[in-house]
């Protein structure tokens, strides 16, 4: 098992990519703590993992990563559950909405930066000191290929994910000699609720059918398909494991070849 005796704090663990990461990490021997705003979803994921891997394998808390006090409370609960801080932090919580730049309100702009970028920062600030003190730690930030390129109507989302890459690279260099790695994964379109909402959005804006809208999204990938949450989780596992110790400061795409840098 590649994460035996490890502890992992996973944000946005109630569904989609975060759920896949939590499930895989627990199967690989980690004790996991999943957080998100929807209690029923994180509760369900922790219960599923508990059934599969034993009751002490998973716990959960409600947390809004955009609120540093809420993040502090969730880490305190995780420390109580683990008996120490997490060895692995996966910053996966995120939101993605689209709007023309000129129609992007202050609230819309700040919401994307608050959740996607500040939320990642707050969790890193909580987790890093103990990782450095222990001389071992792994941080995996779920960014996006929108953190490397741009696209129409996603200025706020893309800017927030570009910020996550800057945060990742700077933090990686800061702790490079401390046994701690910090990396980002950059998915293309993944088969989750977030993409279902993107499909609905294309339908509403263009009048295309759901099937046509989904085909348009799949067509953006050279592999002509959506990435699965499990594929993103597999990369997160490599980065979180001992095998990933030489990889730091990187932003690795899981996108079927859509972006080649
Ligand atoms: P999803 O199915 O919508 O899941 C998002 C998760 O984040 C949920 O558990 C959600 O729970 C949580 N979350 C959202 N806002 C939060 C907040 N303020 N505090 C705490 N948790 C919060 O989306 P997904 O596709 O799995 O996306 C996961 C990550 O992958 C995101 O960072 C996203 O940007 C990135 N990504 C996704 C795709 C894609 O195509 N799906 C592509 C590239 C990158 P609550 O709503 O209950 O809080």
Image: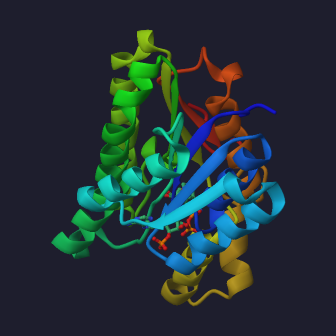
Measured from the top left, where is residue 5 in percent x and y? 68, 33
Q: Residue visible at 63% across and 86% down?
A: 208
Measured from the top left, where is residue 226 in percent x and y? 73, 60
Q: Residue visible at 74% across and 82% down?
A: 211
Measured from the top left, where is residue 147 in percent x and y? 44, 45
- The image quadrant of residue 73 is bottom left
Depth check, front residue: 197 or 44: 44
Number of callouts = 0
Depth check, front residue: 63 or 215: 63
> Is the C terminus in the top left, top right, bottom left or bottom right quadrant?
top right
Q: Residue visible at 53% across and 33% down?
A: 87
Depth check, front residue: 34 or 217: 34
- The image quadrant of residue 102 is bottom left
Residue occupying the far left of the picture: 106
Kindly tell me whether residue 26 is visible in this rendering. Answer: yes
Depth check, front residue: 154 or 229: 229
Residue occupying the far top of the picture: 177
Measured from the top left, where is residue 91 in percent x and y? 47, 48
Q: Residue visible at 78% across and 40% down?
A: 28
Kindly tell me whether residue 163 is visible in this rendering. Answer: no
164 vs 106, left or right, is right
Vertical arrangement, residue 86 with respect to residue 202, above or below: above
Display coloring: rainbow
Vertical arrangement, residue 30 with respect to residue 17, above or below: above
Vertical arrangement, residue 68 with respect to residue 79, above or below: below
> Is the N terminus in the top left, top right, bottom left or bottom right quadrant?
top right
């Amino acid at each position: 098992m590649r994460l035996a005796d490890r502890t992992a704090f996973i944000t946005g663990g109630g569904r989609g990519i975060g759920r896949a990461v939590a499930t895989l990490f627990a199967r690989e021997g980690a004790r996991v703590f999943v957080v998100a705003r929807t209690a029923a979803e994180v509760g369900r994921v922790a219960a599923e993992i508990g059934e599969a891997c034993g009751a002490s394998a998973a716990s959960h808390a409600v947390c809004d990563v955009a609120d540093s006090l809420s993040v502090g409370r969730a880490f305190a609960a995780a420390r109580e559950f683990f008996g120490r801080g997490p060895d692995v932090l996966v910053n996966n919580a995120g939101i993605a909405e689209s709007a023309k730049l000129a129609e992007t309100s202050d609230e819309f702009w700040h919401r994307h930066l608050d959740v996607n970028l500040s939320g990642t920062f707050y969790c890193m600030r909580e987790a890093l000191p103990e990782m450095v003190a222990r001389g071992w730690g792994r941080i995996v930030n779920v960014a996006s290929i929108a953190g490397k390129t741009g696209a129409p109507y996603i200025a706020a989302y893309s800017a927030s994910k570009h910020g996550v890459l800057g945060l990742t690279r700077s933090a990686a260099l800061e702790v490079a000699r401390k046994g701690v790695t910090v990396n980002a994964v950059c998915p293309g379109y993944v088969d989750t609720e977030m993409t279902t909402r993107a499909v609905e959005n294309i339908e509403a804006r263009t009048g295309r059918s759901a099937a046509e809208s989904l085909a348009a999204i799949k067509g953006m990938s050279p592999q002509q398909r959506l990435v699965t949450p499990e594929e993103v989780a597999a990369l997160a596992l490599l980065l979180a494991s001992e095998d990933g110790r030489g990889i730091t400061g990187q932003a690795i795409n899981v996108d079927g070849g859509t972006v080649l840098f």
